[in-house]
Image: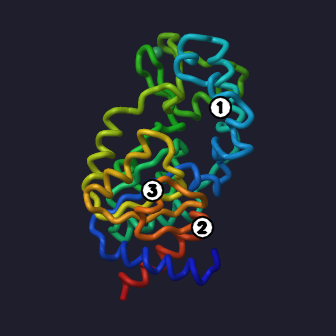
Amino acid sequence: MNSQNLESLADQVADLIVNAKRIIVFTGAGISTESGIPDFRSPGGLWDRFDPDDFTYQKFISDASSRRKQWQLLWKERLTGEVKPNPAHYAIAELDRLGKLDCVITQNVDNLHQEAGVPDDKVFELHGNMQWVVCLHCGRRYSLEQIRTRLEAGEEVPDCETCHGILKPDIVLFGEALPEEVFSEATTHASNCDLFIVIGSTLIVYPAALMPGYAVDAGAKLVIINLSATPVDDQATVLIRAKAGEAMSEIVRKVARKTAG
Ligand code: ZN
């Protein structure tokens, strides 16, 4: 997309934002690739190199060797290195400061919306949050930092210090149901918004992919910012094929200008 084209599409989205009252931002893996987090489903991503069948919830809870494998993979792929929010995350947080954000619904587990400054209670995490680890037996929660320290000390499969129950990252594994309460609250918000902005999701993972439909059915306008096609592109009022950081920075700059003047 050339810069002039992006500029004019960003201007249209900024107008939609200025005129909307309840805006939802829906984000997927594509917003966090710019922070260096791999999109598991892309070519070269995690599921090109590993078999998702080895990483199901059922295997995690029933098979100690699978559990070790899953912890090792998480450790290797997700627990090392510093990951920081990128301009797209900051642009969304800026929308909130401008009083334009109802909530964020995200498929991501990386905590980057909160780190960028969106309040906790405005982020609905459909697939959980990697910052937390939970005991499946007694429910005790541990921070990722606590577990990281134990893994670094050589523990392969950490268990609960209180009851020796199975510890699981507080994220939704394959074959595991979505957190019901979060999903139902997110659905309520989606059904009551007037502008729904999809950023960096191909909208193919169900039931998360139903969210834009709830919004459109309720009469909301739809904006899609994604590098590849989605199943609901034809329903979008504005469709932007650009990187999330670039597009969102431009959009929020324009919103700030329009609301100031
Ligand atoms: Zn426990």
Label drawn at residue 74: 1
Q: In which quarter of the image is the C terminus?
A: bottom left
Would you say the residues marked 1 and 3 are in contact, meaning their CB atoms lie under 8 Å apart? Answer: no
Task: Say which amino acid is labelled 3.
Answer: Val
Disc 3: CA contacts within 10 A as few (<14), some (14-19) or many (>=20): some
- Residue at the outermost bottom position: 261
Residue occupied by mark 2:
242
Q: Disc 2 or 3, which lies upstream in sequence? A: 3
Kind of element beneath mark 3: loop
Residue 1 lies left or right of residue 169; in this view the side is right
Task: Say which amino acid is labelled 2.
Answer: Ala
Q: Quadrant of the N terminus?
A: bottom right
- Residue at the outermost front position: 234
Question: Ligand 1 closer than 8 Å to the CB at disc 3?
Answer: no
Quadrant position of residue 93 = bottom left
For the residues carrying marks 1 and 2, which lies nearer the camera in this image? 2
Nearest to the observer: residue 10 or residue 143: 10
Residue occupied by mark 3:
232
Q: How far apart are marks 1 and 2 (CA)?
A: 29 Å
Q: Where is residue 33 in the image (x, y as percent from the top left)?
A: 64, 53
Task: Say which amino acid is labelled 1.
Answer: Leu
Q: Where is residue 127 in the image (x, y as percent from the top left)?
A: 47, 38
